[in-house]
Structures are given as C-alpha cells and as structure tokens.
Image (cartoon, grey):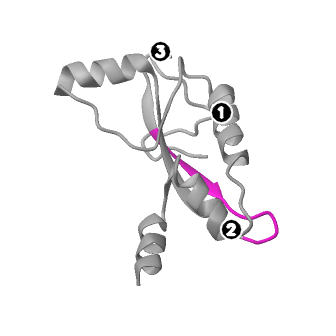
Amino acid sequence: MISLEIEDTLENFWPHDIHNFGTWVKLMIGPDNEVGAEYFDIFVCTPDWLKTECLKHGFVWERHILIIDEYDLNNITAKICWRIDRCSGNTWSETSLNISKYAAWEFEDVEVLSQKI
C-alpha cells in the first residue's frame, strides 16, 4: 500500500492535522497462488478534508472513497483489508470485479469492454 501523493512511505508519514487528511492510496493485490499483483486505487480522507475541499471548490466528486475519522495507518489498513477480504470470488476475475466496487482497478474498463464484445 503506497501513496503517490506523499513523498515518504505511509509508515513514516504523519499529516499536519490527523482530522483533515486526504490522499489516493495504491493497493497491490493478487491471488494467493500466483506471482504478481494488480493495482487498485482508493481515496482515503476524513470528513474535515471533504468539508475543506467542498468549501474551497464548491463541491467534491469522488468515487472509490474510504472516509475515516482520523489519520491512523493501522486503522486504514485494517478497514481496507476487512473490505477486500469480503470480495473473494470463484476466480481472480470475479474477485477483481468485486474489489473494483470499492477501489479503482487498473483493468476495470478493459474487463467491461471485453464483456461487451
């Protein structure tokens, strides 16, 4: 789990205000019995961050979002793992589609397009 918006690792990062925080987090997830992983992105933020952004821009438009009460990496990791653990399917393709309901999957649109063809 990494954030491309934060210069340091998430383990070493601490925001100025734990109640006003938001960043995209990249997850690398793959099947247990295979080498490699695929990328999923989720936006993690606090209600205060949403309020600040809404006041600044007049709106907030996000998909694949996890709203937490404060920045706590252990809690964030636990919530993400809890959700992903409940997304299993009979195949990796099914599992990926289930995860993509909560985090943007790098092949999300490719899968949808291939099903339409």
Query: At label 1, which amino acid type do we have?
Result: Lys
Q: Residue 91's spot in the image, x, y percent?
A: 71, 69
Q: Which residue is mark 1?
A: 79
Q: Which residue appears at 17% of the width and 25% of the height?
A: 58
| Mark found first going from the N terminus, 3 or 2 | 3
**Alpha-carbon distance for marks 1 and 2?**
21 Å
82 above or below 57? below
Is 91 drawn above or below residue 23 in the view shown? below
Disc 1 versus disc 3: nearer the observer:
1
86 on left or right of 53: right
Decide: few, some or many residues near mark 2? Use Cα within 10 Å; few <14, some 14-19, many ≥20. Answer: few
Q: Which mark is nearer the camera, 3 or 2?
A: 2
Q: Which residues are magenta?
A: 24-35
**Would you name the residue on which mark 2 appears?**
92
Check disc 3 and report the residue beneath it.
19
Residue that appears at 56% across and 46% down:
2
Instruction: Kindly identify the amino acid type of the residue bearing the numbered disc 3.
Output: His
- Is there a contact, CB below 8 Å, between mark 1 and mark 3? no
Q: First in sequence: mark 1 or mark 3?
A: 3
The image quarter containing residue 16 is top left
